[in-house]
Image: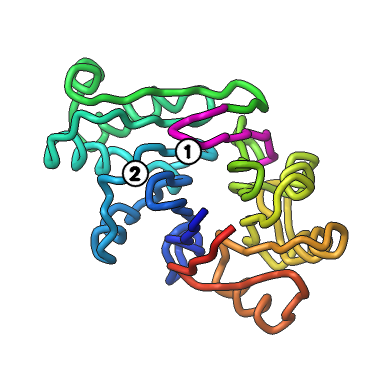
């Protein structure tokens, strides 16, 4: 799999918000600004057939309506887009469309070819546009449910989360994990450098940090922790 970190930052940082693109066709979260950044960098957004959402916060869902309008209204595509996320993802997007003064629910159902798969517990989805996607519940404070994912039994993604059993399960069952590393010290909503160092030492697997605050990024670069990669937006790797 070819993996590209579209964004490695968080809100209120100089980097794009956390977002990961796989083989140019599956994307994990679509924060505000993502769609414009993909167009700006010459990506063929028509290749994206699967959107996987970690949780329903706006900084992980805000650009999905813009993407869908482009695909179905501008490109006039008839191909299916599959959207996977926690229970409530369909209603969340209908609310976003309404907030943006876009199509209503009936118009979306009539004019857009979308399949929603709502996750109500940790589960494995097989052969979703040729991908196996395992959803694992994680702990993102009061935002429940929130999920991390394992793609094709290789790539782990924590989404936004504090350290928890779900994170360790993702780490154990993936070769590389793209992990929330928001803070210097983690809390119940986001992991910190202390949590990343613990995971790197315990499992001896590669961790690629994302959702970074600017000061956290700087501190991680100074500490240079073994098995922990700190990169900027558009970092690419293969797995």
Could you tell me what secondary structure mostly forms the magenta stretch? strand
Residue 175 appears left or right of 120: right
Residue 176 appears left or right of 46: right
Whether 130 is among the magenta residues is yes
Whether 64 is among the magenta residues is no
Q: Are marks 2 and 1 in contact (CB under 8 Å)?
A: no
- Tag 1 residue: 52
Mark 2, secondary structure of its residue: loop
Which image quadrant for residue 181? bottom right
Which image quadrant for residue 69? top left
Residue 84 appears left or right of 194: left
Q: Residue at x 32, y 56 (%)?
A: 33
Residue 104 appears left or right of 19: left
Whether 49 is drawn above or below 17: the answer is above
Q: Residue at x 82, y 63 (%)?
A: 204
Q: Which mark is residue 48?
A: 2
Q: Quadrant of the C terminus?
A: bottom right
Mark 1, secondary structure of its residue: strand
Task: Name the residue nearer the viewer: 85 or 145.
Answer: 85
Q: Residue at x 25, y 30 (%)?
A: 79
* Spot occupied by residue 178 in the image (x, y as percentages of width and height): 62, 56
Q: Nearer the viewer, mark 2 or mark 1?
A: 2
Task: Name the residue nearer the viewer: 96 or 48.
Answer: 48
* Spot occupied by residue 76 in the image (x, y as percentages of width and height): 13, 35
* Spot occupied by residue 141 in the image (x, y as percentages of width and height): 66, 41
Q: Residue at x 65, y 23 (%)?
A: 121
Whether 30 is drawn above or below 87: the answer is below
Looking at this view, name the residue that lies furthest to the right. 202
Magenta segment: 126-140
* Spot occupied by residue 113 in the image (x, y as percentages of width and height): 26, 24
């Amino acid at each position: 799999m070819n993996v590209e970190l579209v964004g490695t930052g968080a809100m209120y940082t100089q980097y794009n918000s956390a977002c990961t693109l796989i083989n140019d066709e599956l994307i994990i979260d679509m924060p505000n600004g993502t769609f414009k950044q993909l167009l700006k960098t010459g990506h063929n957004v028509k290749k994206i057939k699967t959107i996987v959402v970690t949780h329903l916060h706006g900084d992980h869902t805000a650009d999905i309506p813009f993407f869908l309008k482009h695909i179905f209204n501008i490109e006039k595509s008839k191909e299916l887009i599959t959207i996977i996320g926690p229970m409530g993802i369909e209603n969340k997007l209908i609310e976003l469309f309404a907030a943006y003064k876009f199509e209503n629910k009936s118009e979306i159902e009539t004019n857009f070819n979308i399949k929603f798969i709502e996750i109500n517990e940790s589960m494995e989805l097989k052969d979703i546009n040729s991908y196996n996607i395992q959803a694992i519940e994680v702990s993102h404070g009061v935002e429940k449910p929130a999920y991390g994912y394992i793609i094709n039994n290789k790539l782990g993604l924590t989404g936004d989360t504090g350290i928890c059993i779900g994170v360790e399960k993702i780490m154990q069952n993936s070769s590389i994990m793209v992990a929330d590393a928001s803070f210097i010290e983690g809390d119940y909503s986001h992991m910190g450098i202390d949590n990343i160092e613990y995971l790197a030492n315990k499992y001896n697997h590669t961790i690629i940090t994302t959702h970074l605050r600017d000061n956290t990024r700087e501190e991680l670069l100074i500490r240079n922790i073994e098995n922990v990669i700190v990169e900027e937006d558009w970092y690419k790797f293969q797995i």
